Amino acid sequence: MADPKGHFAPYPGGGGCFDYDAVFVLTPDGRTSEQEASHALLERTAASISEEQQKDGGFCESQQVRPRLRNLTGFLERIGSARNPQLLKERARYALALQRPKHDRIHTHWSLYQRAWGESNLWDSWFRMLTLARIACAFDPGEASRWGFIDYPGIGWHPSLRRSDTP
């Protein structure tokens, strides 16, 4: 369900949570699967996320949702990359909904500030870095100790950090 750039959100340019969740599923036990296609996809995802880092060092939700006209081709490519009719329908519906003015800015329940789609923020920066770390460790599990993953279950935990004294 990834787009040609390796993003997994229903809109072009990916999304911090969408991309992380997909990479988490693609790297069971923190490692890549034996399938070559999976390796190539993870490499593509890491490369595109790295290229999208903002000048301020952070990451945004998506650089390809706004402005509308400049990114119309991204929406059309994302919709067209669907491999089945149900996915095509869902992507088209989502893309159409995002064109409404109420989606010009991102509204969240934890802040009164409404950020722009291409604006760096802590939420997306956190998930993008976790995604890059997860991919790096999937290819070289020894890297997990260098990334500072947490050693208890939750977002930011890596399975290679399991303590040997726990079942």
Image: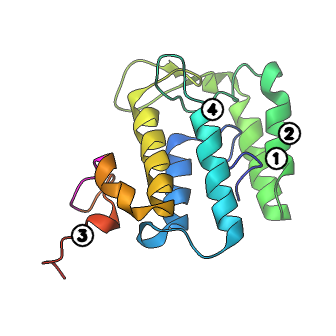
Label 1, label 3: how many angstroms apart (C-alpha)? 40 Å
The residue depicted at 53 percent of the width and 20 percent of the height is 119
Contact check, label 4 and label 3, Cβ < 8 Å: no
Q: Which residue is mark 2?
A: 76
Does the magenta-highlighted stretch encompass residue 24? no
Label 3, label 2: how many angstroms apart (C-alpha)? 43 Å
Disc nearer the start of the sequence (4/2): 4
The residue depicted at 21 percent of the width and 61 percent of the height is 152
* Amino acid, disc 3: Arg
Label 1, label 4: how many angstroms apart (C-alpha)? 22 Å
**For discs 1 and 4, the disc positioned in front in the rendered view:** 4
20 left or right, relative to 92: left
Q: Residues within 10 Å of mark 2 (few under 14, many from 20)?
A: some
Q: Residues within 10 Å of mark 4 (few under 14, many from 20)?
A: few
Q: What x and y, as percent, mark residue 127?
A: 44, 42
98 left or right, relative to 20: right
Q: Which residue is mark 1?
A: 79
Residue 51 marker: 4
Secondary structure state at the residue bearing disc 3: loop
The residue depicted at 33 percent of the width and 53 percent of the height is 155
Disc nearer the start of the sequence (3/2): 2
Contact check, label 1 and label 2, Cβ < 8 Å: yes
Label 1, label 2: how many angstroms apart (C-alpha)? 5 Å
Q: What x and y, as percent, mark residue 10?
A: 68, 47
* Range shown magenta: 148-152
